[in-house]
Amino acid sequence: MRSQPAVDRAAGPPSEGASVAAESSAVDAQRPARLVVVWCPDWPVTAACVAAGVPLHHPAAVFSANRVVACSAVARSNGVRRGMRRREAQASCPDLAVLAVDPARDARLFEPVAAAVEELVVGVDVVRPGVVAAPADGALAYFGDEYRLMETLIDHVSAKAGVEVQIGIADGLFAALLAARRSCVVEPGASRRFLAPLPVTELDQPGSVLAEYDGSEELVDLLRRLGLRTLGQFAELPERTVSSRFGRLGMLAHRLANGLSERPLDRRRPPADLAVDETFDIPISRVEEAAYIAERLADELHAKLAGRNLACTRLGIYARTESGEELSRVWRCSGGESGTNGVPVAARGIADRVRWQFDSWLQGEQRPRSGVVTLRLEPEEVVEAGLLQLHLWRGGLGDNPADDQADERAGRALVQVQRLLGPEAVATAVLDGGRGPAERVRLVPWGDVRGDEAKGAGARSGSGQAEVAPWPGRLPAPSPATVHPEPVRAAVVDHRGRPVRMTARGALSAPPARVAVDGGPLWEVAAWAGPWPLDERWWDPGADGPAARVQVVLAEGGAPAGKALLLRCRDERSPRWQVEGEYT
């Protein structure tokens, strides 16, 4: 049974003069490709019902670890929600059909949908079972109109695959997917306006780009608690603020909220020698055989990518059968998936996609006439591996501390680095006692006892953190974000242009009015705090003697420059000012 949703047009940006035109032209440089997305609502439930023989109008839900991961519209109308425990869901809907998660099943049954879309649109990518995306430009050149394309696709897929689909067209995968959920077309350049009023929880909906990353749920919950209820409110935050507060996962979410692609547009065509292939003397006709070979080829492909510091974002799977049939499918790979080995877009993710695709080919309705004799894995699109890097060995914000397996793998890797470069090559930063920012961090070689009994460290607090004993003259919080290994020379003068000195009592001879760093121009001092006198190592003849620290906020032309410095002054008669650190 098919219901054809109404097609709406999302309003484009109004004309607001030259300022809007300039802003639009600046955004055009980063605008993602225009995509058409075909979405099958609640596909895991639909596939599970078809495989189990459950009528599609019956309330059903797919469970993993006794929690609902997907449910049908009928089940939602009876109070079932994603994340519910099994007992709670069955209490809300006693007739609920309980089905198990099976990604291979979902991929196998989705192949006819992808094939039906591919008959009308070229360049089809399987984003995940239930969602396919394709460039809209090529299809529009044939159909001429986006609404005609949508209507034709809905009719064709429903006739060929017998499932209900919704279609959306927008700039970028994230906006196009949300447009498909609403069956609308977003005008070119209007993705940010389309996304602005939508709730921030759309970032973590099943199948979204961000939802593939560990910690996405915690990030969205944090944004809501901070009062950022819509994507537009989050998009208005400065990039620098988002980066410093939420890290790489927050930057990814910020790009999506702004209607941009999930990563900067620096993609490149991969070298030809990255592809891996194998020819089999005995044709492959079983999924188990294909899965074994897929893992080996995936390891080989991942090793080639890692050797060039690359990561695959689109994977092409190509096969040829004994009778000469050519089979192919392209899968999109997201940067946040971790599989069982915790490595984003690594061998396990590649092997899973190959196994799912072979399950579709060998057990689907349109099976090849003979077994597969040649298999080739080809990265269709790659990016620098650093663009997908989150944390050292975990997925992202809000990592699970119980991931002992990931910790163990990271520990083995760090020990191997020590074997190659020496025990001092890998160190852990430990909070220690001291008055200055550089003195409060001590590097302990990896594997050594960090030692809460070290100098300046006291008993452990209830939170497990070492409580640092009081240090007279200690710099108050916050500490500088940047501490220079070698202090940078500076000059400080008062409002009359005379050098500011430190008196014998550790005070300043006059309030600092201007600061020059390393011979550069003078900056006005908007505010300052201190001084904090220092008189240490008095017994050491080679010590610098008494000193004082001062915090200053710089301004230029009466406007804040957004820069603050930690200065240190030595020698009462011949002042020597130095920049110890910088605040951001």
Image (cartoon, grey):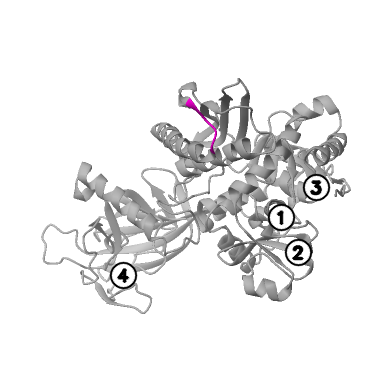
Task: Report the disc number at residue 164.
Answer: 3
Of the two numbered discs 1 and 4 on the same chain, state the one appearing first in sequence: 1
Where does the image place residue 576, in percent across and percent down from the top left? 28, 54
Is residue 285 found inside the magenta-colored segment of the image? Answer: yes
Furthest residue toward top: 324
Q: Nearer the viewer, residue 326 or 147?
A: 326
Label 3 to label 4: alpha-carbon separation: 67 Å
Residue drawn at point x = 16 percent, y = 59 percent: 543
Q: Amino acid at mark 4?
A: Arg
**Which contiguous range is marked in magenta?**
282-286
The image quadrant that residue 53 belongs to is bottom right
Label 3 to label 2: alpha-carbon separation: 17 Å
Label 1 to label 4: alpha-carbon separation: 66 Å
Q: Nearer the viewer, mark 4 or mark 2?
A: 2
Q: Amino acid at mark 1?
A: Cys
Quickly name the residue at label 1: 49
Q: Nearer the viewer, mark 3 or mark 1?
A: 1
Task: Report the disc number at residue 427.
Answer: none
Label 2 to label 1: alpha-carbon separation: 10 Å
Where does the image place residue 297, in percent across and percent down from the top left? 45, 33
Residue drawn at point x = 38 percent, y = 76 percent: 463
Where does the image place residue 299, in percent across and percent down from the top left? 42, 37
Of the two numbered discs 3 and 2 on the same chain, state the one appearing first in sequence: 2
Is residue 40 found inside the magenta-colored segment of the image? Answer: no
> As drawn, is 416 to the left or to the right of 103?
left
Q: Main secondary structure of the magenta part?
A: strand
Quickly name the residue at label 4: 474
As drawn, 120 above or below 426? above
Asked if labels 1 and 3 touch by Cβ distance under 8 angstroms, the answer is no
Quickly name the residue at label 2: 59
Query: Is residue 560 at all visible to an observer of this figure?
Result: no
Q: Secondary structure at mark 3?
A: loop
